Image: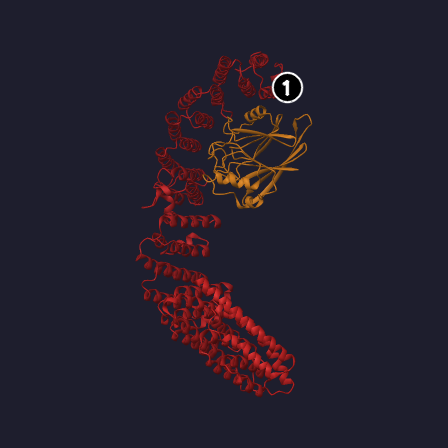
Amino acid sequence: MMVDGVEDEEKWLAAGIAGLQQNAFYMHRALDSNNLRDALKYSAQMLSELRTSKLSPQKYYQLYMRAFDELRKLEMFFKEETRRGCSIIDLYELVQHAGNILPRLYLLCTVGSVYIKSKEAPAKDVLKDLVEMCRGIQHPVRGLFLRSYLSQISRDKLPDIGSEYEGDADTVNDAMEFVLQNFTEMNKLWVRMQHQGPAREKDKREKERSELRDLVGKNLHVLSQIEGVDLDMYKETVLPRVLEQVVNCKDEIAQCYLMDCIIQVFPDEYHLQTLEILLGAFPQLQPSVDIKTVLSRLMERLSNYAASSTEVLPEFLQVEAFSKLNNAIGKVIEAQADMPILGAVTLYSSLLTFTLHVHPDRLDYADQVLGACVKKLSGEGKLEDNRATKQIVALLSAPLDKYNDIVTVLKLSNYPSVMEYVDSETNKVMAMVIIQSIMKNNTQISTADKVGALFELIKGLIRDLDGAAHDQVDEDDFKEEQNSVARLIQMLQNDDTEEMFKIICTVRKHILTGGPKRLPFTVPPLVFSSLKLVRQLQGPEENPFGEEGSTTPKKVFQLLNQTIETLYGVPAPELALRLYLQCAEAANDSDLEPVAYEFFTQAYILYEEEISDSRAQVTAIHLIIGTLQRMHVFGVENRDTLTHKATGYSAKLLKKPDQCRAVYACSHLFWVDDQDNMKDGERVLLCLKRALRIANAAQQMSNATRGSTGSVTLFVEILNKYLYFFEKGNTQINAAAIQSLIELITAEMQSESNSPDPAADAFFASTLRYIQFQKQKGGAVGEKYEPIKV
Amino acid sequence: MVLVLAIGDLHIPHRASDLPQKFKSMLVPGKIQHIICTGNLSIKEVHDYLKSLCPDLHVTRGEYDEDSRYPETKTLTIGQFKLGICHGHQVIPWGDLDSLAMLQRQLDVDILVTGHTHQFKAYKHEGGVVINPGSATGAYSSFTFDVNPSFVLMDIDGLRVVVYVYELIDGEVKVDKIDFKKTATTRLAH
């Protein structure tokens, strides 16, 4: 059915255009031969095509535009005629003889244009006549286009200030009256369309109305362009008259469009000064009008106006813009009790943005808006609507963007309350926004209270909220979120050690609610934060006679111990081991032997009981040996116990090469450069010899299983270690020992069963080069190396 | 002229939230030909960021790295130079130059790039050069007390390498440079 209708319309339009063009052709011929009578006849016939009721507005418009173009040529002809002596008044009379009213009026308007230009009559008189005459057309589509034509041709002929048509009698008042009247009549026609035709075609009618709306709105645009219409005139006459029409027409489509039009078309300063009148119209509108969108747009415009220059801000204060808008919105929300939550939040969001732009220093205003929003939300329960949630995120992000400082935002007492009403997904989104803001602006959050408030705010990231869908979390997203929390923890700083300790305790309290999934992310940054605090406490400024109960390194270490313990439940033994070793080093620097020993014990237990993967063991043992090697706080007994254990672990690694390397690394445990009593040459040599034995065993194993003895790399490594201690002055290692090791390696490399390894060869070669270099150094070093032959 | 960025021990997010802003604005994609990273990034995001600066990225494993697939050591040739990378927690005693020299001999490289101590070093010994770019974020270290954020840029040109070290001290970026020349017999001279 629809297709047929469209096809028919196409046919009618084509027919209309054809008819129009044909008559235009004859009209042109008449114009060329200065035949006024024929010109009028054919132009009237041409214009008759516009009498159709069969076309939709879009199609009618096509017909209209062609007629418009033709009428321009006719107008030029009329102008020529008057120059040739034809009286314009006569012409004005003549065209009214056209048979049908619609062509008659189009012609009249066209002549009227020339009439006004001739100045033989005041512009206001002609305009008044025309606008009244157009009443003859009451058909909505035809009437709207006719009046649109009138508006178009009269635009440059209004008696505006500074215009050539302004006379003593003609004032801007007349121009205004003319446009207002045209507007009023056009609106009436437009509204009438709503009620024409059967109920089942309502949608079609409303669509057609929508296509025509700009014709009506144009009048407001013209009004705004009239120079003489200043603020006073707008306030006294234009706005009240326009609003009167808008309210009285009681038509939802017209009201919605026109209110928006008013806001878009007239300058923002006007709106500010007429805020009360404008807002007063809203309650009088039809209940079905989408007030919230219009109000939001108004506030958006005013926000941008405020943002454009600081000079306009006092105006806002002077007219008490905030309280007026706040009241208006309150009334609207109250009146429309069943407004969906999206609407209410959008309104509050716009109002908040407005407040932030206009009154950035009035946190109480912003808080008021949030409070009103909370009140509305409290009646709803948790939000389901996706768009409403997005609006809430916009609402909450606005103060963050404005102040760039979460600390200021936290001063808004209602801010956390709003967060309470969003679902856990949105909470996470908002939490990420907050963290980004902190990182971008390098915001300092320096007291435990603020930290606590912040972590409450972002709790969606910190722990599983009730009812959250745990299994739907994307792993990468989860990692990103937790890493953001970790980065956030780095930003929490205070140079005052007491306050910093409180901050650490507060953070700890929150992250411990996170559960095993989150702890591996959040515990390490907290640990390092604490270690930084320990270092601060060791600083020279620290008063060693601090008050009772003040923070000490010991207290921090206690906390650290309890914190790292929580990783057992994850389980994350490798991470825990690393953290224990870090703490041990820090305890070492604080001269706390028992504390350091305790941390080592914990690390060792983890190694023995929880770390079974070979590769992990190798790394872990190297970390243990490396850390232990640097410890100076241990007494002989403790150190011996720990060293003995470490060497034991080293010898028990699975793969022989790993064993070998770990054992010779242990040799350094018996030789610490800066502590003379820590240089046990014998035990160093014992380690190295043990490493040699293991390397040998490895060779034999290789021979047995693969038929060749494998690489000599391990031997070269051990040789290098021999050289290391030789140079350091370990008397147990002499040139002879080194010599025999060199010969051993050389023999191995040349043996038949040895599979060549270029890397090992190069290593051996560079070691020999090193020995050569040392020999050539001369002095004490040269002497030492002299006996070694390479 | 080949530019090689040596960087490492960022420890993001365990010990630092991000690279210093002044460093970030200096490290622009397209200017560097190779990146050598000693390890302890520690998360994928940092890897991706470095990759965005230069696609030729070489990383060795630090003990806190999230990705356990990075190798313990790596060697590569750039121009006339052989470079070796190792995080350094494997070399005991930590930071000991003689032990690092041993590793250098083992890898048979002219330049050894290593980290772990968070302390910038550029040291020449008979076997070659050892460079430690320090910690790019100034991360906490049990080894070094006051860590200034630092990284190294090497300009390799024929037989010569110029090592530029960038350090952030009291909010200002300070640059220093050291020259190393390699003789044709493949041994590095100062």
Which sits in the foreground, A237 or A90?
A90
| Picture layout, residue A91 above or below residue A509 | below
Q: Quadrant of residue B5?
A: top right
Q: Quadrant of the C terminus of chain A?
A: top right
Q: Is residue A323 visible?
A: yes
Q: Chain of mark 1?
A: A
* Neighbour tally class for label 1: few under 14, some 14-19, many 20 plus, Cα within 10 Å: some
Q: Quadrant of the N terminus of chain A?
A: bottom left
Chain in red, by letter, is A
Q: Is residue A502 visible?
A: no
| Picture layout, residue A399 above or below residue A256 | above
Amino acid carrying mark 1 in the image:
Gln
| Picture layout, residue B27 above or below residue A144 | above
Q: Quadrant of residue B171?
A: top right
Residue placed furthest toward the right:
B184
Which residue lies under the disc numbered 1? Answer: A772
Horizontally, residue A435 falls left or right of residue B8, namely: left
Which sits in the foreground, B106 or A450?
B106
Tell me where residue A339 appears, x and y as whole percent: 34, 62
Tell me where residue A271 appears, x and y as whole percent: 45, 70
Horizontally, residue A198 falls left or right of residue A718, namely: left
Number of labelled discs? 1
Tell me where residue A166 appears, x and y as whole percent: 56, 83
Chain in orange, by letter, is B
Q: Secondary structure at mark 1?
A: helix
| Picture layout, residue A724 above or below residue B23 | above
What residue is shown at x 51% (from left), y 81% (from top)? A105
Tell me where residue A568 appears, x and y as whole percent: 36, 33
